[in-house]
Amino acid sequence: MTSQSAGPGPEVAERITIAAPAEKVYTAVADVRRMARWSPECFAVWVTRRDGGRPDRFVGWNRRGPYLWFTTCRVVTATPDCEFAFDVTTFGQPVARWGYRFTATDGGTEVTEYWQDRRNRTAHVLGKVFTGKAAGTRPTVNRDGMRETLNRLKRELEER
């Protein structure tokens, strides 16, 4: 059975300024294995394919409460010091696009983390099965998670 790909849904975004150059922030975020240190949901990343020196495809392992699931990810934008983004699927179904935009500021770098829902009907059902949550709660959960992720990223990069 095949499902049609969902078009992009509304974007949810959060911003923070980090007292570090865009190059340093981009390098940290583009090393997708480090996401497990910042994200309240992702606890492990396994890089499955590299394009040159950077990850091209990877698997993210996630946990929320008693629920555990994995997603497969493909990097779609990797523009140093500007943007890093990847598309997420699960069981071949579109889930989301996650990304980070970097803008140099007087105080360092403004980082915008964004999430765009790309789920089709099948992916909505899978999401409910694997997370126990109604599909409509995902934007709120992700916004809260983005705030935590960005704060942890800021703390780590400003300590060094």
Image: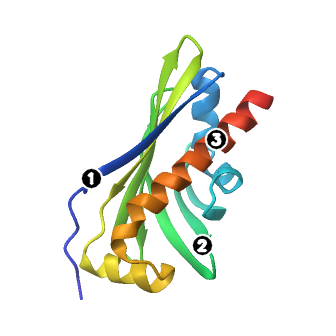
Q: Extreme right residue here?
A: 160
Compared to 128, does 89 lie above or below? above
Residue 9, picture quadrant? bottom left
Helix, strand or loop status at disc 3: helix
Q: Report how far apart the C-alphas of labels 1 and 3 lie in the structure.
A: 23 Å
Are dots 1 and 2 in contact, CB under 8 Å?
no
Compared to 95, does 123 lie above or below? below
Q: Residues within 10 Å of mark 2 (few under 14, many from 20)?
A: some
Task: In this rendered view, identify the residue nearer to me: 62 or 65.
Answer: 65
Compared to 77, does 72 lie above or below? below
Are dots 3 and 2 in contact, CB under 8 Å?
no
Q: Earlier in the sequence, mark 1 or mark 2?
A: 1
Q: Which residue is mark 1?
A: 10
Name which residue type carries label 2: Arg
Name which residue type carries label 1: Pro
Q: Quadrant of the C terminus?
A: top right
Q: Report how far apart the C-alphas of labels 3 and 2 lie in the structure.
A: 19 Å
Where in the figure is residue 127, as x and y percent of width and height?
41, 77
Where in the figure is residue 58, as x and y percent of width and height?
55, 61
> Residue 64 shows which numbered tag?
2
Name which residue type carries label 3: Asn
Q: Earlier in the sequence, mark 3 or mark 2?
A: 2
Q: Residue at x 63, y 76 (%)?
A: 65
Q: Residue at x 55, y 55 (%)?
A: 145
> Residue 151 shows which numbered tag?
3
Q: Residue at x 53, y 49 (%)?
A: 146
Q: Decide if residue 33 is on the left or right side of residue 114.
A: right
Q: Extreme bottom residue here?
A: 1
Helix, strand or loop status at disc 2: strand
